[in-house]
Image (spheres, helix red, strand yellow):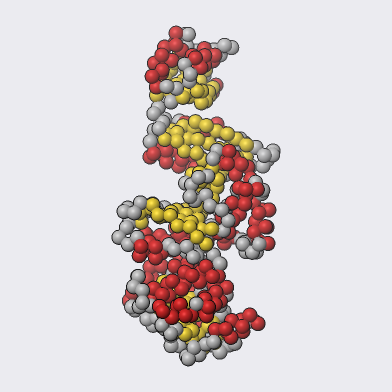
């Protein structure tokens, strides 16, 4: 697993410069998040990208992206060896989905790697199947606790795994 | 052995029926036993020479028992060796069962109970009282019905430390959740079906809010894990908010949802959990199951019928036999 934050100029054709090399090297893009509210003084937009990729290809990928003139602000290889699945039931979208996901992602030791949302009807509670990854069991439990706390404040019910 | 049956609802009648039906077999363990008192919430009958249980059952079938005696009078004053306390559960204050059990123990009379209330409310106090008066309190029937839990842990797994338990302790919830999984129908619809089948009570709160499972979990934690826990210590989430979509999404990812009661050294919790479809706890219908994690034996798994009058009688009879001198188990 690799997560990186790249700074992209706010014009068309920038993101593809990052995604192309990932795809070429057989990486699987888990998430792409534009952080428009954190725009840099030079007007660049930080974009956070999480990729599942063969460990051995990471250095090559970084070189390829940089060779295209993209500024990689930071990246880390997270050995997210443990994952768990949870079910969320409630008004997931209308309670600021991003802040729910961010609560886990910004810990640095865990992140949301998969999320599927099913909405039966407008105004009815939706259901989400969510996968968390973390560096170890203890951190995984910690990230579940954080997620539960955020969800509890938003009235979202969390169904934990066994 | 002189027996008093306090409480004559479906469990009390189930025990009486088994005591009649299996007399020849049970005599081998219990000797020439007789039931000298049977009471219900309104009255009761007593005969020191032994009641004719068939007649008592017939009286109850036709209405209520004669008002020859009362539960309180029996436990305080009359002469008998073992009390079978099977009045309904009340997790608020444990009454009236708590008083019945205390009065018997004070007099040095052994008690066998299926009543969760007194044990969930005052486990430690009752055990101390029993010890002080050289009496024994047996309660296999309070958890998991016919499924062996207490004696399994205390006798067969003696010497093991019970590290954690997790399982399904409420058949009504398991029925509702396994039907929701199969039919992908709303909770309310399946609950109605369960009521019509007599699986859920008219007021299902006790089951669907996890109160029943919570009380059982408290008893298990106290009895086999030596955790000094009370009912209020259980973190409790019920099943009423679960949706068909939740099951659909879970199934697509290889999971189902069951109400799981879990006790560890750190917490006691009853809540709906995601269970892998191939996990032994992904059981169907009204069954109960428990996974016991131990330090020596590893994991031990039991599954069985958690409710029903004959099933509960099974646990009560096994406790009764344990109390008799013929089987030295506890």
User: Which residue is pictured at 52% across the width and 62% down the height?
Assistant: B305
Question: In this image, B174 relative to A82: left or right?
Answer: right
Residue extending farthest to the front is B24
User: Which residue is pictured at 42% across the width and 41% down the height?
Assistant: A141
Give the camera-side residue of B262 and B25: B25
Question: In this image, B32 relative to A101: left or right?
Answer: left
Residue A55 position by quadrant: top left
Residue B217 position by quadrant: bottom left
Number of numbered discs present? 0
Q: Position of residue B138 (x, y in %)?
A: 41, 71
Q: Is residue B279 above or below residue B130?
A: above
Q: Position of residue B193 (x, y in %)?
A: 67, 57
Q: Position of residue A77 (x, y in %)?
A: 39, 24
Give the camera-side residue of B145 and A107: B145
Residue B155 position by quadrant: bottom left
User: Which residue is pictured at 40% across the width and 32% down the height?
Assistant: A81
Give the camera-side residue of A71 and A54: A54
The answer, for residue A160, to whether it is visible in the render is no
Q: Position of residue A54 (x, y in %)?
A: 42, 22
Q: Is residue B106 above or below residue A105?
A: below
Residue extending farthest to the left is B159
User: Which residue is pictured at 38% across the width and 52% down the height?
Assistant: B299
The answer, for residue A119, to whether it is visible in the render is yes
């Amino acid at each position: 697993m690799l997560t990186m934050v790249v700074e992209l100029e706010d014009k068309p054709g920038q993101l593809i410069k990052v995604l192309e090399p990932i795809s070429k090297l057989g990486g699987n893009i888990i998430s792409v998040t534009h952080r428009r509210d954190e725009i840099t003084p030079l007007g660049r937009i930080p974009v956070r990208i999480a990729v599942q990729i063969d460990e051995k290809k990471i250095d090559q990928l970084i070189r390829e992206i940089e060779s295209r003139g993209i500024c990689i602000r930071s990246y880390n290889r997270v050995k997210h060896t443990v994952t768990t699945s949870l079910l969320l039931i409630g008004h997931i979208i209308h309670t600021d989905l991003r802040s729910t996901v961010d609560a886990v992602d910004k810990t640095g030791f865990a992140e949301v790697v998969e999320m599927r949302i099913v909405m039966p009807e407008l105004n009815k509670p939706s259901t989400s199947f969510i996968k968390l990854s973390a560096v170890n069991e203890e951190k995984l439990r910690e990230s579940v606790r954080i997620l539960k706390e955020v969800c509890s404040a938003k009235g979202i019910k969390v169904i934990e795994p066994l | 052995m002189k027996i008093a049956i306090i409480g004559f609802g479906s469990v009390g009648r189930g025990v009486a029926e088994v005591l009649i039906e299996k007399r020849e077999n049970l005599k081998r363990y219990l000797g020439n036993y007789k039931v000298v008192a049977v009471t219900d919430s309104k009255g009761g009958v007593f005969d020191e020479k032994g009641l004719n249980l068939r007649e008592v059952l017939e009286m109850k079938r036709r209405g209520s028992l004669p008002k020859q005696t009362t539960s309180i009078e029996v436990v305080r004053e009359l002469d008998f060796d073992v009390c079978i306390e099977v009045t309904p559960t009340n997790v608020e204050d444990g009454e009236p069962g708590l008083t019945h059990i205390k009065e018997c123990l004070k007099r040095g009379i052994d008690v066998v109970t299926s009543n969760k209330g007194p044990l969930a409310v005052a486990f430690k106090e009752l055990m101390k009282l029993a010890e002080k008066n050289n009496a024994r309190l047996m309660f296999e029937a309070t958890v998991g019905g016919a499924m062996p839990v207490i004696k399994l842990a205390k006798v067969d797994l003696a010497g093991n430390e019970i590290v954690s338990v997790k399982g399904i302790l409420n058949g009504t919830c398991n029925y509702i959740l396994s039907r929701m999984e199969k039919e992908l129908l709303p909770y309310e619809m399946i609950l109605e079906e369960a009521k019509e089948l007599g699986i859920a009570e008219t007021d299902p709160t006790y089951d669907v809010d996890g109160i029943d499972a919570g009380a059982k979990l408290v008893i298990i934690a106290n009895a086999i894990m030596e955790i000094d826990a009370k009912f209020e210590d259980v973190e409790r989430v019920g099943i009423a908010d679960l949706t068909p979509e939740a099951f659909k999404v879970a199934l697509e990812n290889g999971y189902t949802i069951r109400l799981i009661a879990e006790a560890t050294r750190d917490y006691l919790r009853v809540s709906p959990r995601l269970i892998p479809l191939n996990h032994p706890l992904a059981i169907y219908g009204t069954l109960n199951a428990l996974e016991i994690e131990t330090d020596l034996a590893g994991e031990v798994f039991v599954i069985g019928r958690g409710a029903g009058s004959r099933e509960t009688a099974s646990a009560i009879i096994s406790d009764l036999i344990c109390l008799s001198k013929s089987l030295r188990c506890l």
